[in-house]
Structure formats: C-alpha cells, structure tokens
Image: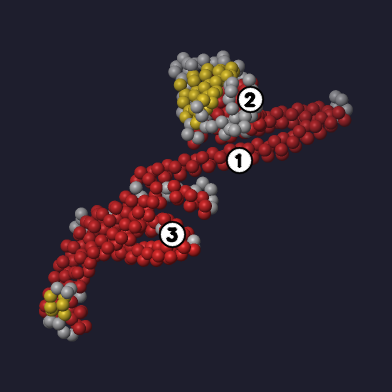
Amino acid sequence: MASGSVWVGLRRRRYLGSSAPWRGIGYLLGGVLLGVLVLVAGLVAAVLGAALAVVLVGLPLLALLAFAGIPVAALERRRLGLIDPTTPAAPTPHRTPEVPGISAWFKLRVKEQATWRELAYTALLALVLWPLDLLVLACTVGAPALLIGTPAQLALDGGEIRAAKLWVVGDYPHAFATALLGLALLVPLLYPLGAYATARAALARLLLAPREAELTTQLAEVTRSRARLVDAFEAERRRIERDLHDGAQQRLVALTMTLGLARLDAAPDSPLAAQLATAHDEAGNVLKELRELIRGIHPQVLADYGLAAAIDDAADRSPIPVDTDLDGLPRLPESVESAGYFTVREALTNIARHSGAPRAHIRARHEDEVLHIDVRDDGEGGADPARGSGLTGLADRIAVLDGTLTVASPPGGPTVLSVEIPCRAQQFQGLTTD
C-alpha cells in the first residue's frame, strides 16, 4: 500500500510494509518542529511587543499576534495530507473580502470565529500538542532506535556503554541482542504511533476545518459569486442597451431621415422613388424593432421612474388587457427592480401565448421590507414552469436576492405567479405612476 489513510493502514496486514508508519512519524515530527518554532517566535514577539509598548511601537506587534493562528492553521491543514492523502485538502474556513485592501481583510478576519479558533489551536500547539508529539515519538521510535543502535555505539566508545540509559552492555553479543530487542519493540510500537497520529490529525481537522464551517463557507461563497455574476450580467445588459441606443439607433434615425429627404428629391412615380420608399419603410421597421429590442434589454423607464412605471409600461404594451394595482410602490434597489420587472414581463408573455385568458391582473406591494408581486390570469391553468417557460432562470435570479418565485396553476385556472424579494426602499422616492 503506497498511499492511503494511516487509520485504514492500521487495519491491514501490510501496515508495516507501507508508507503509513513513515507518514505518521513525519506528521508528528513536523508537529514538534512547528510547535517549537511557534513557541519561540510567539515568546519573542510577545516580549518585544511588551517592551516596546511604552513607546507605542510594540502595540501593532502585539495586535498582529492575534492573527498568528492564520498562517499556522493554513500549514496545519496542508500537513493533514500526510495522514490521509486520499482526502481532499481541508479548505480554509475564511471568507474572501468583498472589497480589496488590507483594511477590509483585517476587519473581516476580526469578525470571523475561525480566526480565534485558529489562534486557540496555535496556543494549544505551542504549549501542549508538540510536547505530546515529542513524548510519543520518544517512546515509540526514540527508545527502540537507541536500542537498535547499541552495536554502533559500542564500536564508537570502545568500552562499556549504557544502552538507552537502562543497562550496561560491554560486549558485542549483548549489543546485538539489545539491537534485536529494540527491533522487536519497534514493530508493535508503530501501531500506537499510527493511532495517535490519526487522532492528532483528527483533532486538527476538527478545530481548523469543521465540516459545518466548510459547508457554510462554501455556500456563502457560491451565493456571493452568483450575486456578482448577476450584477455583472445587469451591468453588461445596461452597456449593450446604452451602446445600441446611442450608436446603432442614432445611425438608423439618421439613415431614415436621409432616405426620407431622398424621396422628396426623386421624381414622383419613378422607379427610384419606389425603391427609396421601400428602403425608407424598411429602415423605419428596423428602427422600430431595434427600439423594442432596447426596451427588452433594459427599459429606460425602469431606470428613470422605477418598477411601478415599468410594470405599467409593460401592461400597456401587452397584447391582452392588464389591470394593475401598484399604489405606493417605492423605488427599490436596482437589482430588485430589474428582477421584478423581467419576471412580470415574462409572466405576461406566457399569459398571452399559452393561457387563453381574456385579461390579466398585476398587484405589487412593498410591505415589511419585502416586495410582493402577484400576476394572476383566469386562463386554462396547468402551467408548468419547468417546461421551458423562461421562469426557471428568473427563479434562480430571484433566489440570488434571497427571494422566492412560486407558480400556482391548477387545471382550469386560475394561474397565480407570486414573487417575494426582501429589500429596503431607497432613500429617494422616484416618480411612480397611478
């Protein structure tokens, strides 16, 4: 067995012939060296900090000691691979600051429980764990090694020696017998050494990378990354809308005006006039479609006047009549307004295409710092968001905002789409429509 957990190796017959005992020894030896280094460095830093505190120079040094556990814990998490190389490396329980900079990093680390848990582990390593590691190594490896080295020690000294400080050996027959005794002791003692190394690593993993903390940290990071992707997507939508509005649309307007002027200069009823008229009409149709596309990407009314005005605009452009109840809807965070608007627009599109409803109803309220939107129709019912209605992606988008999207659509109707997004009203109140 070339690799694998030391604990698994202990239960196999080939444990002594595998790398597991050597990895256990290496893990404990590394713990001794790291513990001594941490103890010495910590004492030096504490003494220097206390001595220089009178001139305020030592205060930052003492403050940095609170973060000493972070690099020590990072190294300890990497060393866990010696005990179990088959297990993925324990991830850091620390979160990534939302903004760059040393100040943001320090503020976040001070608030995290992991920082203080790692500091406690570092103190435990410096004061308790490395002496235990050294004691186990001395009893399970050191003493047998001294006995095994008795013949070499006798050859170097040339006289009587005290083997492992236990008894006197004066000739080679007794020296080789002592070496065989040391080898016989080493073989069984490697088993408790492996068990202790496994328990020692389990303690480090428990304190430095608890499973709950791993899952919580990973989930928080995924949530933040999804939120960043949504923000980036919204920013890209606004950029595309702005480029189309200020670039392609203005060029089409200029082209339409040029074609209109050219029609005035062309002889009436001539082939050129007919071609210019056709080109002018096509340019007008393209301009109309481009304006609809721009409105669909990110309507200007949403940015200027808020969600209530944008919903009213979508209702006015709906192919079926829509009743709206939006009284008192304030300006909300941009991401919330965007998600609410596109959800309403997708719902109206589905109603017009699939429901057969003669009319739709939209009600939106902001109560108790939660945005509530209900879109209702009296159509045939039986709507299933999973069948490619476009609501699945919107539900994921709303989930990033800690919101929910539900659809109730029994056969025969009515169909009710409900959205709830926790959010606070903006300090300024934009214009809203009645």
Q: 170 above or below 33?
A: below
Residue at the spot 42% in from the left edge and 56% down from the top edge: 67
Q: What type is the residue that disc 2 sits on?
A: Thr
Left or right, 257 with respect to 412, comes to right
Count neighbours of disc 1 (C-alpha within 10 A) and say few if under 14, some if 14 to 19, many if 20 or more.
few
Residue pointed to by mark 2: 432
* SS class, disc 3: helix
Q: Quadrant of residue 79?
A: bottom left
Mark 3 → mark 2, Cα distance in angstroms: 56 Å
Asked whether residue 282 appears in the rendered view, the answer is no
Count neighbours of disc 3 (C-alpha within 10 A) and say few if under 14, some if 14 to 19, many if 20 or more.
some
Which residue is nearer to you in this view: 398 or 142?
Answer: 142
Q: Residue 73: image x %, image y %?
A: 38, 56
Q: Residue 187: image x %, image y %?
A: 18, 64
Residue at the spot 42% in from the left edge and 63% down from the top edge: 50
Q: What type is the residue that disc 3 sits on?
A: Leu
Q: Earlier in the sequence, mark 1 or mark 2?
A: 1
For the residues bearing labels 1 and 2, Cβ distance under 8 angstroms = no
Check the picture and name the quadrant holding the C terminus: top right
Label 3 vs label 2, nearer the camera: 3
Residue at the spot 38% in from the left edge and 63% down from the top edge: 42
Residue at the spot 74% in from the left edge and 31% down from the top edge: 283
Q: What type is the residue that disc 1 sits on?
A: Glu
Which residue is nearer to you in this view: 131 or 346?
Answer: 131
Mark 1 → mark 2, Cα distance in angstroms: 26 Å
* SS class, disc 2: loop
Which residue is nearer to you in this view: 409 or 265?
Answer: 409
Q: Which mark is residue 62?
A: 3
Residue pointed to by mark 1: 236
Q: 285 above or below 83?
A: above
Asked whether residue 429 appears in the rendered view, the answer is yes
Count neighbours of disc 2 (C-alpha within 10 A) and say few if under 14, some if 14 to 19, many if 20 or more.
some
